[in-house]
Amino acid sequence: MGAYVLRRLWQMIPTLAGVMLLIFVLFNWVGGDPALVLAGKITNKEQIENIRKQLGVDQPSYIQLAYFGFEVATGFTCTWRSYTEKPTDSPKPTADAKADTKTDTKADTTDAAKAAPSGCQAVRSWATNEEVPKILTSRIGPTLTIMIPVLILETVFGVILAIGVAYVRGSLTDRMIMMVCTVAMSISFLVYIIVAQYYFGFKWGMFPVQGWSDSFWKNLTTYAPLPILLAVFVGLAPALRLYRSFFLDEINNDYVRTARAKGLAEKTVMLKHVLRNAMIPILTNIGIALPGIFVGSFLLESFFSIPGLGREILVAVNRSDFPVIKAATVYLAMITMLINLAVDVLYKAVDPRVSFK
């Protein structure tokens, strides 16, 4: 298994390079001139040219691509003239300035320790001038606070209900539950949010409609329950239908008929044989959904005023904040590849017949 994991990690390098190349082409060529986007209503050609030089987009494409790769790897942005231009000589301090220099020595030493590499600076948002890595790390906490419980509850309840519905397959209960799921899936997520906020938040006062705090426990017990319950309720219908189909596919196999012929109880057949063999496609579905927890729900975070990563990406798109969008896209691609590798390894734990090749 170790050789398989190393081989997969090695294969991620060209995949990530392809993702970075695609992002570079989309944002630098298809998306137009970033200098014009950042300039906004500025029409002065000299100012636009200065912005283009600051961004480094006046350089050849291969140099710009090298800048982008360095930004992804380090979180700092550098330009070619950072290494070619000589620093200007600073004027000598006067007698009055020497006293101020002594008092500021400690502060300058501290700032120098935290400074970026020579000629470079941290990648910053075009809209807020915040450092992009700090933006992403500060927004990921609220997103995970909401989405991890959603994924766990949705999977657990979806599997339990699906195996129960598959147990009574073909009955009136099965048909009624499938009809309710179909109706629930046909309603927009936005409708659920508005109705839940009106009744549970405004009319009945059970949960706050909007808000977030610095306390993790308060967020989890006060602000997060309504978005979590709402997301679980909405996601349970498609999960139930999908997992039910997985169980029905396994029920019709020969090994299930053999187990019944041996005299095993129906519950034993469902829980011991069908459930374990149906875990392969269930794990696949979970692996597809896992990267989404790092992005969150755009609608949930927007309507409930949750300062998460999904809301930040939506704001960045509205502001044409390219650095934030590019960073989120690249890091999400890296997380997706790592999750796919973890799911493939878990296949072996669920089904010993799986072999790594």
Image: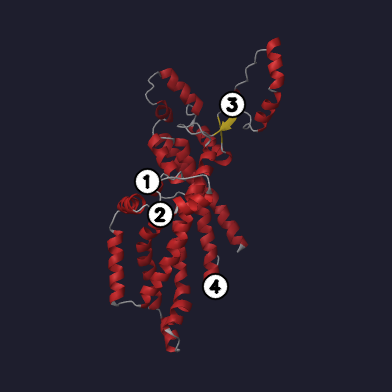
Image point (70%, 21%), residue name: 103
Q: Which mark is residue 319?
A: none
Tell me the distance, in whole angstroms, between the alpha carbons under discs 4 and 1: 45 Å
In this view of the protein, can residue 246 be seen by the observer?
no
Answer whether residue 96 is visible to the viewer in this image.
yes
* Among numbered discs 1 and 2, the one appearing first in the sequence: 2
Asked whether disc 4 touches disc 3, contact meaning CB atoms under 8 Å apart, the reply is no
Q: Left or right of 305: which side holds 179? A: left
Q: Nearer the viewer, residue 206 or 224?
A: 206
Q: Nearer the viewer, mark 3 or mark 2?
A: 2
* Circle 2 residue: 226
Q: Residues within 10 Å of mark 3 (few under 14, many from 20)?
A: few
Q: In the image, is residue 117 above or below residue 343?
A: above
Q: How is the image coloured?
A: secondary structure
Q: Which residue is mark 4?
A: 352
User: Could you give the CA–CA distance between mark 1 and mark 3, rounded to whole angstroms?
Assistant: 43 Å
Q: Quadrant of residue 113?
A: top right
| Numbered disc 3: secondary structure | helix
Q: Which residue type carries mark 2?
A: Leu
Q: Quadrant of the N terminus?
A: bottom right
Which residue matches tag 1?
A: 303
Of mark 4 and mark 1, the one earlier in the sequence is: 1
- Is disc 1 in contact with disc 3, using a CB cutoff of under 8 Å? no
Residue under the image location 53 percent in, 43 percent down? 137
Q: Nearer the viewer, mark 4 or mark 2?
A: 2
SS for callout 4: loop
* Mark in front: 4 vs 1: 1
